[in-house]
Amino acid sequence: MAEAELGPLPAGRHGFSREQVAHNQRERLIAGLATAVAEHGYQAVTITHVTKAAKVSRRVFYANFESKEECFLAAFEVVVGHIRELAAEAIAPVFDWPRQAIAASGAVLAFLASEPGLARLCLVESQGASPAVAARFHEAVHEAVPFLEQGRSERERGRELPPSTEESTIGALVMLASRKVAAGEAAQLEDLLPDFAEFILAPYLGAGQAARLARSLPG
């Protein structure tokens, strides 16, 4: 959602269709919401903050969204969709699950580190915005459960893992990343990759092998 891509349309006869104008306005509102939330926090953000950042009128806002919450959810979905694409691209050229897990984690952390405002929107503001937003946040992060469950096939014979293993792992990862973002250190999120690797891999490969793989990461 680069600012250059979402700038206001030129005034006057610009040659864009009504549908193109409406799409541009909606995209600008989503980007404006992300900007306003990064600056003020979700609870303090007003529709005026959003429309000012998007450079559109309140009438345009209400033509696209019924509320601040609905606009926030739209922004959240855009970011989550992009994260899914990044993770899929990172995994595609990698054939073994442990390194797929590391590659996906690295891609997501790199993106969020490059977009501190979006990292805050997704990992901090979404958890306390409203019950509906918080519920959507938990749904989104738990989309990773099936991928983590693939790690069970990597285990050697032994005691079966508890059913809650994946949920607990995701909770730990979210807590680590959220704390860093809340502390104003989103740009350093990539520093968490070794910790992410150990948290993800340890239940399936054992603590020793997970630590060895984490230590082998560059940086």
Image (cartoon, grey):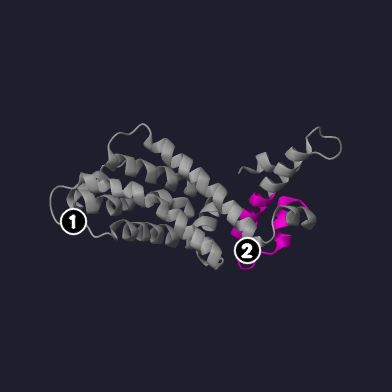
| Dot 1: element | loop
User: Could you tell me the amino acid type at mark 1?
Assistant: Glu
Whole-number angstrom distance, CA of label 1 to CA of label 2: 46 Å
Q: Classify mark 2: residues with Cα within 10 Å, few (<14), some (14-19) or many (20+).
A: few
Q: Nearer the viewer, mark 1 or mark 2?
A: 1
Where, by quadrant of the figure, is residue 51 drawn?
bottom right
Query: At 38% from the left edge and 46% from the top edge, which residue is drawn?
Result: 105
First of labels 1, 2 by sequence position: 2
| Residue 22 location (% of width, % of height) | 74, 44
What is the crowding at mark 1: few (fewer than 14 residues within 10 Å), some, or many (at least 20)?
Answer: few
Q: Residue at x 38, y 33 (%)?
A: 92
Decide whether the magenta segment is chiefly helix, strand or loop.
helix
Q: Is residue 127 above or below residue 87?
A: below
In the picture of the structure, the residue carrying the numbered disc 2 is: 40
* Residue at the image position 15 percent from the left and 47 percent from the top: 156
Residue 62: image quadrant is bottom right
Q: Are marks 1 and 2 in contact (CB under 8 Å)?
A: no
Residue 186 screen position, x and y as percent? 48, 54
Give residue 25's mark: none
- Residue 143, horizontal then vertical, whole percent: 42, 51
Q: Position of residue 206 (x, y in %)?
A: 19, 51
What range is drawn magenta here?
29-57
Q: Spot the residue most to the right.
A: 12
Amino acid type shown at disc 2: His
Q: Is residue 70 left or right of residue 159?
A: right
Q: Which secondary structure lies at badge 2?
A: helix
Q: Can I make out residue 193 in this image?
A: no
Residue 90 magenta-highlighted: no
Q: Quadrant of the N terminus?
A: top right
Q: Write the residue at 55% across / 64% down.
A: 132
Mark 1 = which residue? 160
